[in-house]
């Protein structure tokens, strides 16, 4: 009998090594190798492969039967928007997000909607007891006779529960806490996460239940476990938001059945997550348009336009070196735009003053289309001149101070017109906008400031 040997597996990329080292040779990460027991090699049998007959004969791609693979609506409109219509039977979805952001709440509300529609659903709670989940379900109004729960962490028991119930929808919370005793590794290790996820994927493809897996994230926001986990599943969703704000964003970074450009928006409330039908109105509800340093920009989240308020504050004291602070914006981009204002807008005083900028409402805007709004907000705060409340600004700023075109301009301007804005500061090459929205075309930052501050 061959002796079991130890292997060291990287928790970041899944690469294996016969001995431990401080740095993974596959991805270059430090201190990611953990020891696992490799299974002994089974006895191999020799077989003739001269004439191998395929078990499944190839068929023309046009003859592939698509019956039963159409997306089924979940009843949660924002989830259906992101998934392109709903959940595909037999698909596997990985939902990641920071602790406490609302992953379990979203999953429980989704299960309740499906169960109320007559579909038997199974929730595998590997982190909480059945009593804890019931308390949350009562608060969310998610008690349904078609919603079943099993508090298990072992893979054989979970597969047995799926085979016994034959549900249409299965949710596992979370994939990092379940384990297979036969593997001999600790829960959460690369071997356990990979093999348990693979077993659930195989069961979904065989019997047809749609499977959702909740995944933990690391301190830098990446999904914990091997990268292979994301390759195994059909869809990867991220649930984001600021725990100090109520807004939650659902995005798809991978989706084999449709586009990854849609965005779902929710608001966290006492009774759970509420769908946000008008996110722009929510983000601008408490705006004070009578103070300097405030500019509204039409941002794009996937294919969805959002009107976001950008605020700036310029300190009065001259400090060397000055501080640049950005919240919800790209900090490096802020420093670059301040330098452009110093050089091309006769605002050299900014080189000795602190500059703060923020995207209000808990959203994060890092696209270059926010450049013009940031520049105008800084100029408004520095000059203590208020921008007109019915004006939006959108455009990329180059190092020479020029204003450049950005993508999806028609959708951005249409959203601004829908909410009652009367004018938009845009690049010179911008096409005509919707009726009732005046376009103020500016070629550089100096012209933009002169034509808008104090308008």
Image: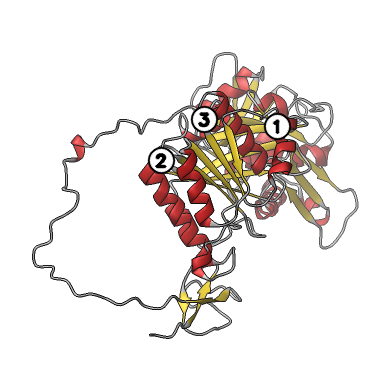
Could you tell me residue 54's position as x and y percent?
A: 16, 54
Residue position marked by numbered label 2 in the rendering: 90
Could you tell me residue 386's position as x and y percent?
A: 80, 30
User: Going from the N terminus, do you reach mark 2 or mark 3 first?
Assistant: 3
Q: Is residue 453 above or below residue 194?
A: above
Q: Is residue 125 left or right of residue 386?
A: left
Could you tell me residue 180's position as x and y percent?
A: 52, 62
- Res. 11 mark: none
Q: Is residue 409 left or right of residue 346?
A: left
Q: Is residue 23 above or below residue 432?
A: below
Residue position marked by numbered label 3 in the rendering: 81
Q: What residue sits 60% from the left and 28% below the top?
A: 145
Judged from this view, the residue extending furthest toward the right is: 317
Of 189 and 398, nearer the camera is 189
Question: If the image is split into quadrants, where does the N terminus sit?
Answer: bottom left
Could you tell me residue 255's position as x and y percent?
A: 44, 43
Q: Give the colouring mode of the picture.
A: secondary structure
- Res. 267 mark: 1
Of 305 and 238, nearer the camera is 238
User: Going from the N terminus, do you reach mark 1 or mark 3 first?
Assistant: 3
Of 339 and 333, nearer the camera is 333
**Cα–Cα gap, marks 1 and 3:** 16 Å
**Cα–Cα gap, marks 1 and 2:** 29 Å
Q: What residue sits 65% from the left and 42% below the top?
A: 104
Q: Residues within 10 Å of mark 3 (few under 14, many from 20)?
A: some
């Amino acid at each position: 009998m061959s002796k079991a040997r130890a292997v060291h597996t990287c928790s970041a990329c899944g690469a294996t090594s016969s001995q431990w080292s401080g740095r993974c040779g596959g991805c270059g990460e430090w201190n990611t190798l953990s020891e696992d027991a490799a299974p002994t090699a089974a006895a191999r049998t020799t077989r003739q492969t001269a004439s191998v007959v395929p078990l499944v004969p190839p068929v023309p791609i046009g003859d592939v039967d698509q019956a039963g693979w159409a997306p089924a609506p979940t009843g949660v409109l924002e989830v259906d928007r992101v998934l392109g219509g709903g959940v595909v039977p037999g698909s596997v979805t990985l939902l990641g997000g920071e602790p406490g952001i609302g992953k379990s709440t979203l999953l429980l509300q989704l299960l309740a909607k499906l169960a109320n529609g007559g579909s038997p659903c199974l929730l595998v709670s590997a982190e909480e007891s059945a009593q804890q989940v019931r308390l949350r379900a009562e608060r969310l109004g998610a008690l349904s006779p078609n919603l079943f729960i099993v508090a298990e962490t072992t893979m054989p028991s979970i597969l047995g529960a799926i085979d016994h119930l034959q549900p249409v929808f299965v949710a596992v919370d979370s994939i990092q806490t379940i384990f297979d005793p036969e593997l001999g590794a600790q829960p959460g290790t690369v071997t356990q996460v990979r093999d348990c996820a693979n077993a659930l994927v195989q069961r979904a493809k065989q019997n047809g239940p749609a499977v959702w897996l909740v995944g933990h994230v690391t301190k830098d926001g990446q999904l914990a476990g091997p990268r292979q986990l994301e390759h195994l599943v059909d869809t990867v969703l991220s649930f984001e938001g600021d725990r100090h704000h109520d807004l939650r964003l659902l995005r798809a970074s991978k989706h084999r059945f449709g586009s990854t450009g849609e965005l779902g928006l929710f608001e966290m409330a006492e009774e759970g997550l509420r769908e946000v039908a008008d996110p722009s109105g929510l983000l601008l509800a408490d705006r004070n348009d009578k103070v300097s340093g405030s500019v509204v920009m039409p941002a794009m989240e996937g294919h969805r336009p959002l009107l976001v308020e950008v605020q700036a504050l310029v300190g009065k004291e001259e400090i060397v070196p000055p501080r640049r602070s950005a919240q919800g914006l790209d900090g490096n981009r802020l420093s670059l735009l301040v330098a452009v204002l110093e050089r091309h807008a006769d605002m050299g005083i900014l080189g000795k003053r602190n500059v703060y900028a923020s995207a209000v409402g808990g959203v994060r805007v890092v696209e270059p289309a926010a450049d013009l709004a940031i520049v105008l907000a800084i100029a408004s705060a520095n000059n203590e001149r208020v921008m007109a409340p019915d004006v939006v600004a959108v455009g990329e700023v180059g190092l020479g101070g020029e204003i450049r075109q950005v993508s999806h301009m028609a959708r951005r301007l249409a959203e601004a017109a829908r909410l009652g804005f009367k004018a938009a500061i845009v690049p010179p090459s911008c096409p005509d906008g919707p009726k009732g929205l005046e376009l103020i075309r500016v070629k550089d930052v100096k012209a933009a400031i002169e034509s808008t501050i104090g308008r």
